[in-house]
Image (tube, helix red, strand yellow):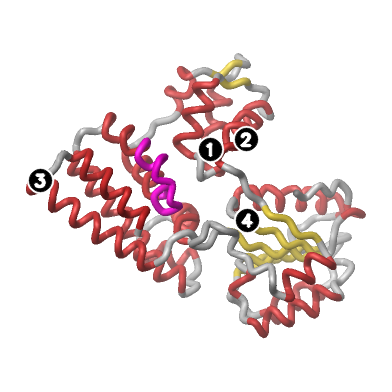
């Protein structure tokens, strides 16, 4: 991870990647904090999202900082640059400006659940040899330790039940977990121990939020967690028609969003097309990176077939939904 503590220790080029964008964003915040010791970044920071004009990126890198020691230039989705543009970035990485900190970012996982980065490219290799490269990830088995550390950083000690619950409801979304932990810690002001009463008073798990988490686990191929979450949803809400409706809404939203995402449409425009908030687009993108258009279409077909069996009364509702999850993960 980024362990830089002083401006003098800053590298001129960073390549940060991995499946957990929240950890990457935290690393960038730490870099900003260090750089701000050398001057205001307000006029000395530019952020790009590929595909974009690489000339703009390079111009930003060559521009001297204004009343500051360093200038920060960030480029997200770096793998979406054309091969020619990546070659131009390689030339820069081999001889970077001393006054610029260039941060290249590539988050998300491919269909094999591996980081969406090609380590064989010249750009990656040059960043590794001329700068700093790091992969940000968190294994499922380590999520509970991360939750405990988040509470401890806020001077709180959670019970094992609290840790278990939080790991189940948001194990693939550290940003959401951090937000929930922050709310719980504030609510438990005046006491160091955090128990289930604090959690239940703060967190309201709507059916919509639970279905979103369910689809996310299906998308990443976690059949066991998907079935556990389905059981929890069915125990809390016996309106089976509502659950089918929410599943259809979420898959359809992903299907539409995938088409725009693959075309490189900016987040704000995607939000406008889908008629949702930009914040919700951010969370959708985490799922869109991990699923293909064909898989989403297949999931919608499986859901339609499942709903037909439900209406015909051919099987029990729980069994129908469990089969839908298993088949969706397998296809």
- Label 1 vs label 2, nearer the camera: 2
Helix, strand or loop status at disc 1? helix
Disc 4 marks which residue? Answer: 18
The answer to which image quadrant residue 41 occupies is bottom right
- Label 3 vs label 2, nearer the camera: 3
x and y percentages locating residue 23 in the rendered image? 64, 48
Mark 1 near mark 2, Cβ–Cβ under 8 Å?
A: yes
Mark 3 or mark 1: name the one nearer the start of the chain: 1
Disc 3 marks which residue? Answer: 314
CA neighbours of label 3 inside 10 A, class few (<14), some (14 to 19), many (20+): few
User: Is residue 165 in view from this perspective?
Assistant: yes
- Label 4, label 2: how far apart the Cα atoms are: 17 Å
Q: Nearer the viewer, residue 70 or 30?
A: 30
Mark 3 or mark 2: name the one nearer the start of the chain: 2
Disc 1 marks which residue? Answer: 177
CA neighbours of label 4 inside 10 A, class few (<14), some (14 to 19), many (20+): many
Locate the C terminus and report the quarter of the image it occupies.
Answer: bottom left
Mark 1 or mark 2: name the one nearer the start of the chain: 2
- Label 4, label 1: how far apart the Cα atoms are: 18 Å
Disc 2 marks which residue? Answer: 146
Q: Is residue 17 left or right of residue 35?
A: left
- Label 4 vs label 1, nearer the camera: 4
x and y percentages locating residue 155 in the rendered image? 67, 23
The residue that appears at 80% across and 55% down in the rendered structure is: 40
Mark 4 near mark 1, Cβ–Cβ under 8 Å?
A: no
Majority secondary structure in the magenta region: helix
């Amino acid at each position: 991870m980024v362990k830089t503590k002083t401006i003098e220790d800053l590298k001129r080029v960073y390549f940060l990647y991995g499946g957990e964008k929240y950890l990457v964003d935290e690393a960038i915040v730490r870099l900003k904090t260090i750089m701000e010791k050398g001057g205001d970044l307000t006029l000395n920071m530019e952020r790009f999202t590929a595909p974009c004009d690489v000339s703009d990126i390079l111009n930003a890198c060559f521009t001297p900082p204004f009343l500051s020691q360093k200038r920060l230039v960030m480029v997200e989705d770096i793998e979406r640059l054309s091969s020619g543009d990546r070659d131009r970035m390689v030339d820069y990485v081999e001889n970077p400006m001393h006054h610029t900190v260039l941060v290249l970012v590539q988050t998300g996982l491919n269909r094999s659940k591996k980081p969406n980065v090609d380590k064989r490219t010249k750009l990656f290799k040059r960043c590794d040899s001329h700068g700093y490269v790091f992969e940000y990830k968190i294994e499922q088995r380590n999520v509970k330790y991360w939750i405990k550390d988040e509470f401890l950083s806020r001077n709180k000690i959670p019970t094992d039940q609290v840790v278990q619950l939080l790991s189940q409801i948001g194990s693939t979304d550290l940003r959401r977990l951090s937000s929930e932990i922050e709310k719980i810690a504030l609510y438990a002001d005046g006491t160091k121990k955090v128990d289930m009463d604090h959690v239940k008073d703060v967190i309201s798990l709507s059916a919509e939020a639970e279905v979103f988490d369910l689809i996310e686990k299906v998308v990443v191929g976690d059949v066991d967690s998907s079935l556990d979450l389905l059981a929890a949803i069915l125990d809390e809400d016996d309106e089976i028609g509502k659950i089918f409706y929410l599943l259809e809404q979420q898959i359809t939203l992903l299907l539409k969003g995938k088409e725009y995402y693959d075309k490189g449409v900016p987040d704000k425009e995607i939000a406008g097309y889908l008629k949702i908030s930009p914040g919700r687009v951010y969370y959708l993108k985490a799922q869109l990176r991990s699923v293909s258009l064909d898989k989403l279409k297949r999931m919608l077909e499986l859901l339609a077939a499942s709903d037909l069996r439900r209406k015909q009364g051919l099987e029990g509702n729980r069994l129908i939904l469990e089969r839908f999850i298993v088949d969706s993960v397998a296809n």
